[in-house]
Amino acid sequence: MYRAEPVDIAVLKERAHDYRDQVERRLSGAMSEDQFKPLRLMNGLYLQLHAYMLRVAVPFGCYSAAQLRVLAAIARRFDRHYAHVTTRQNFQFNWLKLSDTPEILDLLADHGLHAIQTSGSCVRAITVDPHAGFGRHEVGDPRWIAESIRRWTSLHPEFTFLPRKFKIAISGDETDRSAFRLHDLGIQLVKKDGEIGARIFAGGGMGRGPAIGVEVVAFSPIRDVLGWVEAILRVYNLAGRRDHLYKSRIKVLVASLGADAFRAEVHKAFADAGDSRPVLSDAEYAATAAAFSKPDFDPDAAHDPAPALNPVQAHWAKRMAIAHVAPGYTGVMISLKRPGGIPGDIDADQMDGLADLAEQFSFGELRNTKEQNILLPHVRLHDLPALYDGLEPLGLTATNSGLASDIVSCPGMDYCNLASARSIPLSQVLSERLDRLGLDDELGPLSIKISGCVNACAHHHVADIGILGVDKTDTDYHQILLGGASDANASLARTISKALTTDQTADAVERVLRRYLQVRTDSEESFAACIRRLGLALFKEAVDAAG
Amino acid sequence: MKIISGNLLDEGTPVWWTGVAWSSDITLAAQIDPKAAESLEKELAGTHGQRVVSLEVVPLKAGGLMPRRQVIRQLGPTVRPDLGPLFDVRMGQAA
């Protein structure tokens, strides 16, 4: 469990106090909208289609049952009784009044939460592998490095006004669940000669002009990671473009310089920093690690009898349980993707119910995933039947983690000012169809991600089947992309269709899925492997086939 | 023709310029000559900026039809019609 330090709480309260004053001055007319807008954005408050939207930062996606209850209370008291889990492991509220937001930030600060670093040209809230701390093949806990970077970069004057936003993702596992090569800066913890260190990438990103990050450092000792992050940020801060919004991300700088020249610039900046370079001492790293307390696992859990699961529960457990390093324990994914539902939405009653279950069965810990689901990280295996029984009345037993109907979708034009098309209706049509056809289990692991515009909030570039919304004659149209991946074989999906209506898109996706079932060697060949073997032509043919 | 939209400073609620005032009813939006819309928007931002923010000049579709983004702003998310403008009324009734 992550616990913010007293100094962090003090900073958050001070920041909330400042914000209250700013809002009062804005509402009184003492401050103009032009003066106020950058201040509200620095506190995560956007003005969207219907009202103000607050993006609440969840440190590394990890939070407690108590914090979830606070979020549920905010949903009830200030919003319309629900919240939305984002692909950046945060929560969003969609229907706020400006004059209520100071009280909301106070409530968040009182409970170690905040909304800073969720907007603006700064280092954004850092995301990590949601299996952090319990993955069986974990090299090191990515949250420790993430927290070290957060402490060092938060409010750092040199990095508060970067050319553009800067996103960092960190993985501590052989298997990448953080998409670290698709971020401005990505770190993978690796082991070399028995020492844990960091492999560092930069220049990745989705959105306009997607790019896979280039390796900048093959192995850095932990003590030098902050130095490398500083060097990358410094090169970007000095050389990144500020004259063109669409060319201001670090991926554009890396592409314009070329990977070798960019790498050389970073290594020079690292060397030039000399004695001023930040060093993460063993003592400081250990203190940072101490912010994450380990659950008090019961050693007797290893000897528990197998859980008594009925067939429905057994099917659910097989799909939603995640291997755990502690004997007798498991992680459990809670899907927010019921058929026909809105991906990522969770209502206040579900939040409170889930908080109760987290306290009862998972040491009070929860995590958000970039797939817009919630993870209970430490569940005793023999508690699985009781957990299922607790989830059922909450409507949270959808059994589709990692399957086709576990569709990731941005809010699209139903909420977002930037969207070109609606995303949620297509996700609803597809999830209902997949449920009706019963294809999920036959297909096996497969990702569908739907973005409403080129900003790619749903990460459609790295989906097996990515879908991009486009505006055409003021109607929803979508382009289909295939072959993306964000794992060790990171690749960007390629567009294979013209713009299609929502119904045409759903039909085309079904044809692609059926074609995959026809042509895969066996059920072990993943969609990505199948495309690598056969190419896109067969699937494009399926998309183009009418009726 | 064009219309001018904005959001109430405190509530964030979408509103439209009727020609004499701001209304939360899109059907009352004044259709403005495209040549006059930009200057009117600047004038409104100057005189009404304390009450209405995020002003935007919105071209109408052929035949004077409203762009669907504006319709969605008026009615609420298409996927949650229960969250539209009558939400507060309904919650009041429920209470």
Image: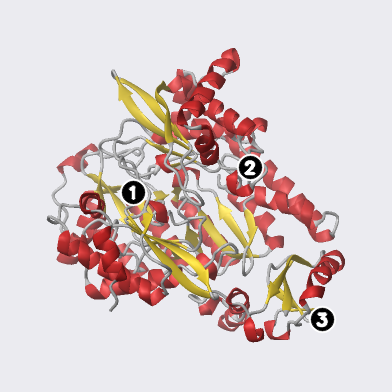
Q: Position of residue A318 (x, y in %)?
A: 20, 56
Subunit of mark 2? A
Q: Which residue was labeled with disc 3? A: B19
Q: Closer to us: mark 2 or mark 1?
A: 1
Amino acid type indicated by mark 2: Leu
Q: Nearer the viewer, residue A135 or A308?
A: A135
Q: Nearer the viewer, residue A253 or A230?
A: A253
Q: Position of residue A319 (x, y in %)?
A: 23, 57
Q: Which residue was labeled with disc 2? A: A12
Tell me if A88 is positioned left or right of A33 in this view. left
**On-image quarter of the C terminus of chain A:** bottom left
Q: Which residue was labeled with disc 1? A: A485
- Labels 3 and 1 in the same subunit: no
- The span from disc 3 to disc 1 (Cα, nearest Å) is 52 Å
Quarter of the figure with residue A182: top left
- The span from disc 2 to disc 1 (Cα, nearest Å) is 37 Å
Q: Is the residue under label 1 in contact with that under label 3 (CB below 8 Å)?
A: no
Q: Position of residue A53 (x, y in %)?
A: 60, 61
Please give the name of the residue rendered at 48% of the width and 37% of the height, measured from the top-left corner: A203
Relative vertical location of residue B23 with respect to residue A272 in this rendering, above or below: below
Amino acid type indicated by mark 1: Ala
Quarter of the figure with residue A12: top right
Q: Closer to us: mark 3 or mark 2?
A: 3
